Image (spheres, rainbow, N blue to C red):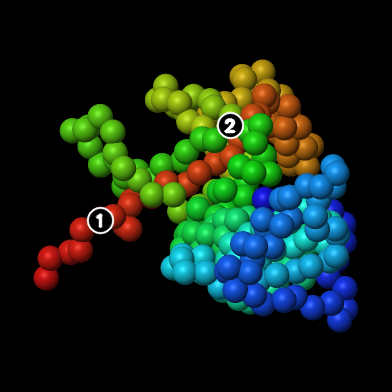
Amino acid sequence: MSKKYNIYFKEGEDYHEVTVEEMAKFIGKWAEFKNGKREIEPDYTCLIAKNKTDDFPWTAIDNRTNDCWTEAFKTKEEAIYWLQNENYDPYEEKERKKMKKVEGKREPATLKLLKLTEENPELPIIAEVNSDVVEDDCCMSWFGEVIGSCVDYVWTGKTFDGMYRTWTLNEALIERGSFVKENAPEPLKQRLKKLNYADSDKAVTQWIKLLPWKKAIIVYVDVPDSISPEPEI
């Protein structure tokens, strides 16, 4: 049960360590009503008690608002910390530590991919697979391992032999000679022959950037070394 008030543990305020029986008696007294009022008025009472359970042996009660907020903890220090910190939730803290432990075991490539998907949830995810992953056509599918990722723009065109090739915008700008030979329409190729180098370069850059590039998260997939068997000696 989370606390709903805005009262902080004041400097010098103390808690009372009691027995389980005394704590149970306090809760019973708090639950009693006389003339429409609780028997216990708000008195800023903070109690802790050690019980007999193994998993959560410490119980704390915060009655500073007369709501008798109660939580169970593994250690006495956690119980006191809860009384001293208004926004502390032991269950949220447990999940936070759990996630931190899991993230510590994740590979950097996985963390980067998760960060990119969180920052760009609207983008499609496409894979660029190393040819070593698929060596022949004896199987319908192959396992690979994510080794990196990035956000880039992609476009697919035909190669000289009629195959399709997907380019990134950066690749197209760097390998513009090959890109123009494979993908530029013939009228553009003829026009480029009549231009000097500077004007030709400018025209090619403009044409490349006007193509219908699609922004995406690119995942680089390589041979799955992490699950591959150890080589025989």
Q: Name the residue that disc number 1 marks.
A: 228
The residue positioned 47% from the left and 38% from the top of the image is 127
> Is residue 49 visible from the viewing direction of this image?
no
**Is 99 in front, or is 211?**
99
Q: Name the residue that disc number 2 marks.
A: 124
Left or right: where 42 falls relative to 196: right
Badge 2: residue crowd in 10 Å (few <14, some 14–19, many ≥20): few
Relative to 62, does residue 75 appear above or below in the rendering? below
> Is residue 80 visible from the viewing direction of this image?
yes
Residue 89 locus on image (x, y percent): 67, 58
Left or right: where 26 falls relative to 163: right
Residue 207 locus on image (x, y percent): 72, 28
The quadrant where residue 229 appears? bottom left
Relative to 57, does residue 212 appear above or below in the rendering? above
Q: Quadrant of the C terminus?
A: bottom left
Q: Earlier in the sequence, mark 2 or mark 1?
A: 2
The residue positioned 68% from the left and 26% from the top of the image is 211
Q: Residue furthest front?
A: 35
**Is 125 in front, or is 58?**
58
**Is 159 in front, or is 194?**
159
Residue 54 locus on image (x, y percent): 44, 68
Q: Which mark is residue 137?
A: none
* Mark 2 → mark 1, Cα distance in angstroms: 29 Å
Q: Secondary structure at mark 1?
A: loop
Q: Amino acid at mark 2?
A: Pro
